[in-house]
Amino acid sequence: MPYLLSIDGGTTSTKVALFDTDGRMLALALNEYQLLTPAVNQVELPGPTYWQAAVKGVREVLAKSGVKGRDVAAVGITTQGETFIPMDAQGRELRNAIVWLDGRAVEEAEDLKRACDLDAYFRRTGLPDINGVWAAAKIMWLRTHEPDVYRRAAKFPLLEDYFIFKLTGEYATEASVSMSAGFLDIIAYDWWDEMLAKVGIGRERLSRLCHSAEAVGRVSRRAADETGLSEQTVVVTGALDQTAGAVGAGNIAPGIITETTGTALAVIATTGRPVFDPKRRVLAAPHAARDEFILLPFAQTAGMTFKWFRDVFGEPEKARKDADAYDLLTKLAANVPPGSDGLLMLPHLTGSSCPVFNPAARGAFIGISLSHTRGHFVRAVLESVAFMLREIVELVLELGVPVERVRSMGGGAKSDLWLQMKADALQKPVEVPECTETASLGAAILAGVGAGLFQSLEDGVARASKIARRFEPNPKMAQTYHDAYKGYLDLFRKLYG
């Protein structure tokens, strides 16, 4: 039986997972690493650290599963965006990776901004603004502050490209991960030479631009010796982690949106055609699904808000050794009626981002009375995230994109109460994928398509992506949540305009 392997290069760890062609995960390995902060606003990691975490993970999943390397048909890659590693002409790392969290290139981003028409830039790249996160600004920083590295760099691969290079000896990338570099024309599906000239590099210093689910090559002898994979194993382009998660959850056509309630709230809405918000409130990008596009609304604080409440006000629950503190707090919320008896919360503890960008916004509890208990506050926290999701869904609908149902992932998807709140607040069905490692599954599905094990991406999703639970909206809750949501919006407007 052929198997599919995925490598997920995350911010603080790399996951490796092994799947069969029915989407069953046979083994998972996670290897963590510590980010380096050599100076203020600088975040780095040695490139070999990523690779060794992947190598260790591959060997671990093969050992755990008992699967032989020769039986792994294909490898798919999914990673964070923006992180890149300058490489010399011999394929050696010239310096540490500059991680997406790094904020050193503020001045360079401002220089680029002054040189561009932002509306025109948005309609070419899908990026609503130019900031120092994009690789474009950081490459400019290298040109000024590390000219020797800049001059000697033959390639500037993103992390997905780097894994592909380490596996095959070839530099290849795809649009879902490359679009946030800041110099990809997502409409032409090509590098944007005018922007590259502003940055100061030519396209020969970038990876070959492929589509997702495209076979790049086979595992090299050196990589086979390191990982235990076969030289016959096909290496396939994958997708940005959020986009791969959408594939793993079956979100590859308009009508389904995926939401991940982790630290933040990340949403992917498949749009079919490219959709550019005239107010530039939301990023647009190519999907891993061929000829499809996505919107990527993002809110900074979701699960983080619940964690803050647990850490500050949940000491009795944290002290319990026989149960999870989040579960205990959620039980308190379950005893409170929908709408939290008029208690409202704004969850913007570090500013709001979408659909209203206001870094000065902060959290708030409003409507506190003597009858409110800790359970009311917990429920208000959970409902605030559901309202934040509804606000994003309404933005997607405003832009003409259909939303028929929602697929939920991340830590928030463990709570049935929270999922039902979202279904009731949205008045849309909410579904939970069977596989909790949806980004890994998505990369594996893309690998299967590239290796010819699936006839198409649709075939791969139909075979491998399954739904475990479905939460239907309760029509009796529609008015209650409509009124509470209106209060939530009014509160934000009164406090922050």
Image (cartoon, grey):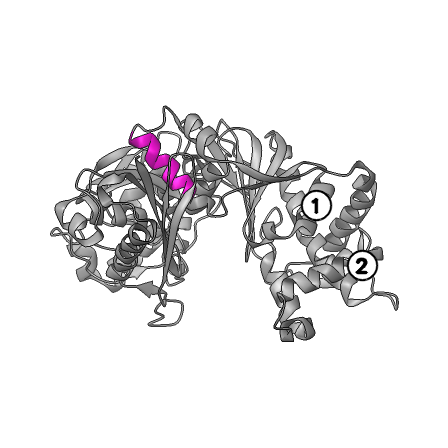
Label annotation for residue 213: none
User: Magenta span: helix, strand or loop, mainly?
Assistant: helix
For the question of whether residue 205 can be seen, the reply is no
Question: What residue is at 80 percent from the left and 42 percent from the top?
Answer: 477
Lower position in the chain sequence, tag 1 or tag 2: 2
Q: Amino acid at mark 1?
A: Gln
Question: What residue is at 77 percent from the left and 63 percent from the top?
Answer: 375
| Mark 1 crowd level (few <14, some 14–19, many ≥20, 10 Å Cα) | many
Cα separation, mark 1 vs mark 2, equals 19 Å
Instruction: Decide which of 349, 306 is in the foreground and name it.
Output: 306
Q: Is residue 353 left or right of residue 283?
A: right
Question: What residue is at 59 percent from the left and 48 percent from the top?
Answer: 354
Could you say where residue 81 lies in the image, as x and y percent from the top left?
39, 49
Instruction: Decide which of 366, 59 is in the foreground and name it.
Output: 59
Where 389 falls versus 148 (above or below)? above
- Residue 46: image quadrant is bottom left
Which of label 1 and label 2 is nearer to you? 1
Q: Secondary structure at mark 1?
A: helix
- In the picture, the quarter occupied by the N terminus is top left
Q: Secondary structure at mark 2?
A: loop
For the question of whether residue 445 can be seen, the reply is yes
Residue under numbered circle 1: 420
Q: Amino acid at mark 2?
A: Leu
- Residue 148: image quadrant is bottom left
Question: What residue is at 63 percent from the left and 61 percent from the top?
Answer: 305
Query: Which span is picked out in magenta?
Result: 441-451
Give yes or no for contact between labels 1 and 2 (Cβ–Cβ under 8 Å): no
Could you say where residue 234 lies in the image, as x and y percent from the top left?
24, 37
Taking the magenta stretch, the answer to whether it contains residue 443 is yes
Residue under numbered circle 2: 343
